[in-house]
Image: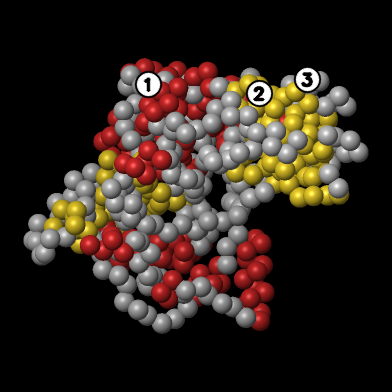
Amino acid sequence: MGAEKSQGTSHSRTHTVPPSKRRFGPGENGEGVYLEGEEWKKGQEQIKTFFMNVLASDKISLDRSIPDSRPRECLSLSYPRDLPTASVVIVFTNEFFSSLLRTVHSVVNRTPIHLLKEIILVDDNSDREELGEPLVEHLKRFGSLVKLIRSTERLGLIRAKLRGAKEAIGVGIFWWSLHYNEGPMPKSEIERRKNPQTDYIRSPTMAGGLFAANREYFFEVGGYDEEMDIWGGENLEISFRVWMCGGSIELIPCSHVGHIYRPGHPYNMTGRNGNKDVHGTNSKRLADVWMDDYSRLFYVHRMGLKDLDVGDLTERKQLRKRLRCRSFKWYLDNVIPQKFVPDENVYAYGRVRSERSLCLDTLQRLENKGTVILGVFACQEGGSASQMFSLSKQHELRRETTCVEVGDLIRPDVYNAVLQDCREDSTVEFKHIEGGVLQHKKRGLCLDVDGVESGGDHRILSL
């Protein structure tokens, strides 16, 4: 059962946990912590070393008050009192004392106690002294509610979460990792949702660190791939698998969870046998099991992985067969139909090559950071992901989510070629004319490399 509008007081229903009382102190009410002088310098050094301001964290109360950041409409909802109990699994390795304990306190403080079966802390082979006996002593205040599991070897995020799930006894499991990309909502999903503030959102994928599932269903549908190492790829693997095997993934607007997002990892991310590319090898496992022929597009980006041995896939392929899962094409057509597939329903897909063997290239510039100036680079034999473009049936010269457009004027009749987010209402069209020229139809401008060297910015010139 889901939430519904509150219709007066009812003993059989409960509202969400009331908001925190307003308090005063560092970080209270969700405010930032501001350091000065030597403390500021120390905090900056900690950010460089640990990717986190530990000094600021230590100043904040473990029972920090925070504002309710959910839509106001969420406050009018109530829920059945007899919902299933949940186990909250928190995985950590060498986490800092204050941030770890504040997470535990927040779960206890802001979860209806009759629904919280347990909190399971999985220590993934930490060696910080404060995470030894001091942690054990602090957790005693929670009695049997909080369980601490120690691993004597580095499991990595994936297997540590699985270890916690196997220990859980609640009907539901919620994972919280201490260590999101957002896109536009499809038109079909906008039309389906009657209340845009509170109705759930069906999502084709999810982030791996924060999600809840029925424990029995989680293991029935295959849990995690235990041959995946440390982290990376597991969130897409479980997303594809759940949808293709009859389930669904939903985002709940009235459920908010905090996450410490760090720009780097302060701990060792090397996998078994010295593998430093665990994200790549994990992703190859999911591509070979779940993506069918569409794995070809994965290997455009990771050609070096194509012939790499990533272990036995028999068990995962048998799981897919046993669950009678659908094809990856079904997933694309039904779960994420708005997704542009670079080599389907296009006039051409590949490199945009000049007579000088220079190819249009993103030069590894981030495409999700607004307007990106395109460049050229020596054409890479065998292909390079940064040089792959499509000429779509709508005459867009594009990549997966970005389209080529005319940028700033450099000098008379000479413009930068740029990438911008593709738009449904875009009027930008390119045509491939005789002689191999790509011309911007509306403005009569052509792609050209005259005067540009490998590694330089591309130009669009007038005829």
Q: Is residue 137 visible?
A: no
Query: How far apart are the alpha carbons under marks 1 and 3?
Result: 43 Å
- Quadrant in the picture for the C terminus: top right
Sooner in the amino-acid sequence: mark 1 or mark 3: 1
Residue at horizontal 41 percent and vertical 49 percent from the top? 210
Image location (x, y in percent) of residue 142: 29, 64
Q: Is residue 345 visible?
A: yes
- What label sits on residue 349 in the rendered view? 2
- Circle 3 or circle 2, nearest the eye: 3
- 54 left or right of 11 in image: right
Q: Nearer the viewer, residue 175 or 377?
A: 377
**Residue at image mark 1:** 326
Residue at horizontal 59 percent and vertical 34 percent from the top? 400
Image location (x, y in percent) of residue 370: 64, 50
Sooner in the amino-acid sequence: mark 1 or mark 2: 1
- 221 left or right of 101 in image: left
Look at the numbered discs 3 and 2 and tell me whether their residues touch, using CB distance below 8 Å: no
SS of the residue at dot 2? Answer: strand
**Residue at image mark 3:** 434
Query: How far apart are the alpha carbons under marks 1 and 2?
Result: 27 Å
Q: Nearer the viewer, residue 197 or 147?
A: 197
Q: Is residue 182 above or below residue 8?
A: above
Sooner in the amino-acid sequence: mark 3 or mark 2: 2
Query: How far apart are the alpha carbons under marks 3 and 2?
Result: 18 Å
Q: Nearer the viewer, residue 78 or 86?
A: 78
Residue at horizontal 42 percent and vertical 20 percent from the top? 327
Look at the numbered discs 1 and 2 and tell me whether their residues touch, using CB distance below 8 Å: no
Q: Quadrant of residue 376?
A: top right
Q: Nearer the viewer, residue 117 or 381?
A: 381
- 330 left or right of 34 in image: left
| Residue type, label 1 | Arg
Q: Is residue 57 above or below residue 309?
A: below
